[in-house]
Each structure stands twice: as structure tokens, then as C-alpha cells.
Amino acid sequence: MATIRDVAKEAGVSVATVSRVMNGSGYAHEDTKKVVMAAVEKLNYKPNEVARSLYKRKSKLVGLILPDITNPFFPEMARGVEDYLQQFGYRLIFGNSDEKRDKEIEYIDTFLQNNVVGMIASTSEEANENFDNLDIPVVLLDRTAEKLPAVYSDQKTGGKLAARVLLDRGSTNIVLIRGPVEIKPVYERYMAALEELNQAKVNVQVMDSSLTLQGGQTCVKQLFEQYPETDGIIACNDIVAAAALQEILKRGIRIPDDIQLIGYDDISFTALLHPPLSTIRQPAYEMGAQAAEMLIKRINQEKMEVTHKKLPVSFVERQTTRRKAEKT
Amino acid sequence: MATIRDVAKEAGVSVATVSRVMNGSGYAHEDTKKVVMAAVEKLNYKPNEVARSLYKRKSKLVGLILPDITNPFFPEMARGVEDYLQQFGYRLIFGNSDEKRDKEIEYIDTFLQNNVVGMIASTSEEANENFDNLDIPVVLLDRTAEKLPAVYSDQKTGGKLAARVLLDRGSTNIVLIRGPVEIKPVYERYMAALEELNQAKVNVQVMDSSLTLQGGQTCVKQLFEQYPETDGIIACNDIVAAAALQEILKRGIRIPDDIQLIGYDDISFTALLHPPLSTIRQPAYEMGAQAAEMLIKRINQEKMEVTHKKLPVSFVERQTTRRKAEKT
DNA sequence: TGCTTTTGTGTAACCGTTTACACATAGCTT
DNA sequence: AAGCTATGTGTAAACGGTTACACAAAAGCA
């Protein structure tokens, strides 16, 4: 690897001149520029980011913490931030937290040790204090906190909407599958749905599940044993919904005629399920991109009007819910 | 952020001593150690990785290039490498290449500029020359090359197996959906399947598709128009298979009675499809982990017997293929 | 006791950049 | 022609660690 000194020697100038030419900072004679660039070309010189980063105390790296990219909701987000950041020459250091606080903290620490310019994170409430007193910008993604800028989606409306859909389409014995209560957005959508359901005169049962396939499958098996009369299920996410769908089919229950089912997230494969899954869509890619945009603004010290961006969710009507009765 | 000099001052020793204590290198009196550690504790000192990396010309970062984490096959791999690397304190710089050569090169360059200790990459044949003359280890993942160590899976057996399955179970009008030919592993499985099919006295048609959902959908729509008599489909991956499955269902074709379908990869949601998709399983997580293991060995200069690890694939029998006739 | 070895510590150079500062020269202005 | 300012370039000091080397004190040994 050629260094700036090699280039300087090759071009017969000082390192300062090379640096100035490379960065277009300060003065440099046209002729000198040419000589330097020729040397750069010849030696295939690429400035060492580490050295630059040491001096500037800022790298071109952004730290990204996501719970688990094995859940298709998150890769979508990750691409949103990567694609956006890429235009500005920023790269990602990435880590899965599995929603575990110690992993979150560990990653935050190593990000800091690597002089990241900023961080985007979906971290738990409690890890947020680790973001205090940082001199680099942080944007929360899919999570919120008073003190930090955040991009997230409208969980309340999402939960309400899911409930409304089943209610409007005639379900009266509804099971609400609640995800892990520690995960804020998941809890919020649950609460909103519950409230909505409670206002209606219907039967509501609550069951717990993790956000994974296994979790969903065990939960759903129990569900039909405990509440065989169920005619509507609101799942905490699409994965669990898919597990429910499979169980429904296995039991020969007709969907959406006997039972309606709605998921959450709209991850890509929901459209491929049979029947295609009705769900509440979160704009994951967009969320990632907007978080990245916000981070860039912070990095560039632009002042921002809004620091908390709540993106809208929408009902994606497919075939696990009935057509709404036309009003005449 | 406290620096080593702050700690030295606080502890009343020199920076060299602090460094030695922190790294457990060279001599240090028990008492001194205690004093230093107390200072470290008090100031919450975390050594700056960038400075360390500059001097050592090696960071604790590993570069990872994957085609697209939006395809569930890759996050699985990514977690495999992340989880394995984590034990050794290595972190990931990550980039999606979209199979584009310029993106691959761009990432390789920035990884180098950031003094990564090593790289793991699923890159195209042509990008491989960019790995020449590097003084850091590189491990190919899901791809192969003569010159580079690699962890991949047995595409040939996989392709053959897929063909064998349909053949043994009685399909005679088979469509083989070929993925992008530039992608080596995809091409290999295709070729192996084709050979196997050609040796049997069956009707074989080949169609092209990208590896994405959209690609699969358009391909599959055409498929049934062009070859309505098809009674077996070998898809280039599970996503395309899922698209095919949906089209089959939509057309009211019975599966597996009228048509058999087999996918490739065994990404997580295939089990959730209805009917659950028969497929060829690649051990993605394991592949990632083993690539990481290999990289670590390289980094630690351990000599290695095998540099090319071919992991076995397996047929996951679910319900889009018929039960094999029992031999009596 | 005197010599060698082991232990403990500090000074300063180095890793590869950026940039403050100094200085020289060219081009204007009056 | 003298005095500006604008332009062009180099020297050296950072950035925050690690480590080669020097040196001193303690321990081991005859």
C-alpha cells in the first residue's frame, strides 16, 4: 500500500501538497495538481482512512444496531440506511443485538472506539442512556425516546387499524397475540389493538408469543386448544401470522370465512402465502432511508425542524380477511 | 473520551506502562497494575481502536460483502459469520453488492482503507482479481476460486438431487428455471440438474428468471402459457419457487398430484408455505460460521489442511413433491 | 560481595494522515 | 517603486495508541 509520502516523493512535492490536492483544500498550482494526480494514479494511492480518522477524530463509518437481520423486516431497513448513506461515502459497521442489552452496549462501545461519525440503532429503552453525553449524532430507528431523534412508524394507528379491520369484517371472538412486552413498538401496537377491541362488544383473548417462527407455532397450537371458537386473530408480526395461517389450514378451518387473520410488518413473503396474508404495512426501507437522511443532516450540523419522524402505516388488504361489507 | 495520557497522568505513570497493563504485555508491578486499573475505571477509559489500528496496521474489523441481505438466504450467513467472529472481538463492516462489480470493488477498497484484518465475500468471478496481492486473508463464501480459500456448498449434488427427486417421483414434463448464469453457484446447480434430466427420457424446458420475487412471478406466468403440460418445476431458489407455487395454486393445478415443485436454499419461510415447499437445503448459517472460522485461522497464521470447504446439501422433503413409491 | 539475570518503568519514535504556520513569489494598486 | 494581497509550497506538530530501547532496581547466584 502506497502512502502519502510515496506519492510526495514520486511527485517531487511535500506531503502537505499531496494532501491539499487530494482534498481540494488550500491552494495548489494547476501544474502541481497534474503531477500529483499522475503520481497518485501511478502508485494507485488510496488514502488510509484510519490515519485520516485518527487525526480528524471522525471516520467515514456509521454504526448500525438492529435486533436481528434474520427477521426479514430488518434487512429491508438496513438496505434503506445503507443505500442512502452510500451516496455520501459512509459505510456501515453492523451488529445484531438480539434485543440484549449487553450486546447493544458492547456494540455501542466498539462503534465509539472506531470513531464512527454517527449511529443508527433499534435499541431497548434502557440502552439509551449509553447514548448520553456522546458527541456524535444518534438516530433511533423503529424505536423512540424523548431525548433522541427517531424514525419510527405509527404503531398506535397500526394496532388500532388491525383491530378495526377484524371488527368491521365481523369477527367477534378475537385472539390478540401479544409479542414480547419489553419491545416497545410491539407493545404499543398490542395496546392500541386491545383498546380498540375492548371498546367493541366482542370477546377478546390475549396470548403471548415471541417474534420468531418457533414461538409463533407453539403459541398458535395452544391457541386453538384453549379457544376453539376463535374467529379472528391479530398477530404481533407477520412471522407469527404465517405460523397461525399454517395451523389454521392444518385444522381445516376456512379462512377468511370461519376465521380472519391479520399480520404486521408486510415483510416480503406475506404476499406469497396462501392465501396471501392481510397485514399492516410498515415502510421498512423508507424508515431506514429516512433515519439515514436524518443522521446525515445531524452530521452536517444542519438544523432540523422535526427530530421525531413518525411514518404512516397502512392496511394491506389481501385474502385472510373478508371483503368489507359495502355500505349501501 | 479519556485518552491513554489522561490515564497515565491520573495513575502517575507513563503511557507505556498503561499500555502494557492494558495489554498484559511486558512487565508491570502488581501494585502498578492496580493503580492503573483504578485510573482506567475512574475515567472509564476505552482504548481508541483507530489509533491502535494505525500503528499495528490491523484493525479488529472484518469486511463482509454479500449480494443482498434482502434475500433471506444471506442474513442467515451473515449471522453465522457475525456470531462466530464475535467471540474473538472482531466486528463487521458490511456491504451489499447486488452482484455488481463496481460495488464489490468499491467495498473492497474501503475495507482496505480501514485496515480490516480480513474479508469474507460472496463476489463475482471477475472481482476476484481485486483480492490479489493483498496482505490480508480473504475467504470466499458461497463462491469459489482456485486461488482463494472458500466455503461453499455442493451445488452439483444439489442440482442433481433436485432433478433426481422429480424424476424418481414421476415427473416427465419438467421445466427447469435457470437463474442468472453469471452467478456461479446458481449456474452450477442448474447445469447439474440439466445433465441429470437429460440422461432421463423426459421432456425438459429451460426458462430464465432473476432470483427475486418479481422475476419469479413474471417467469412463472409465462411458464404456464408456454408449457401448460408441465408436471414438474425445478426452481433456481426458494423465492422463485414460492412465486411458482402461488401461480400453481391460482391456476387450480393440484400440487403435488398434477405438478411437483422443488426449490433451493431452504430459507426459513419455505416451511410456512402452503403446501410446505420441498427444497434443497444449503446450510447457510453453518457456511457463514465456517468461513469465519477459516478466516480466523488465516489471521492467526495457523496452517490449514483444507482451504476449500464444500458443505453438503440435503433434500428437505415437504409437500410439493410426491411421496416416493416404496420399493417392495 | 560482586556479577548476572530478571523485573519494572520511562522516553521517544512511529503508524499515515491533516493542518497551522512560516515563508516565498507573483500580481495588483497607487 | 514600494507596499499590498493573493497564491503556492514546505516544515513540523498534532491525532492516540504501541513498542524498541535505555536504564535502574531487585533478585539470584557463586
Image (cartoon, coloured by chain):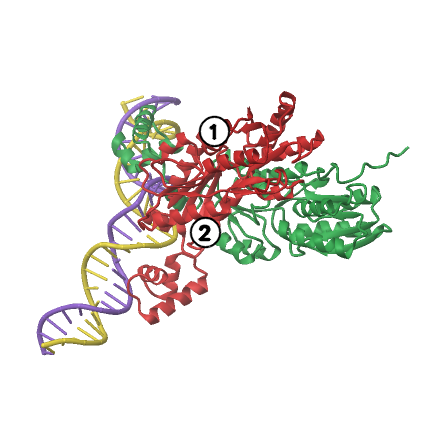
Chain colours: A red, B green, C yellow, D purple
Circle 1 crowding by C-alpha within 10 Å: few under 14, some 14–19, many from 20: few
Q: Amino acid at mark 2?
A: Tyr
Tag of residue A100: none
| Mark 1 touches mark 2? (CB < 8 Å) | no
Q: Give whichever of A308, B144 is nearer the camera.
A: A308
- Residue pictured at 30% horizontal, 31% vertical: B43
What residue is rendered at 72% in x and 56% in y? B222
Label 1 sits on a secondary structure element that is helix
Rendered location of residue A237, percent (x, y): 55, 35
Name the residue at the front extreme: A328
Q: Position of residue B281 (x, y in %)?
A: 69, 40
Residue designated by label 2: A84
SS type, badge 2 = helix
Q: Residue at x 66, y 35 (%)?
A: A257
Q: Is residue B110 left or right of residue B272?
A: left
Q: Nearer the viewer, mark 1 or mark 2?
A: 1
Question: From this viewpoint, is residue B253 visible?
Answer: yes
- The amino acid type found where label 1 is placed reads Glu
Compare residues A7 and B202 and report the one nearer the observer: B202
In what quadrant of the picture does the N terminus of chain A appear?
bottom left
Which residue is the site of mark 1?
A: A195
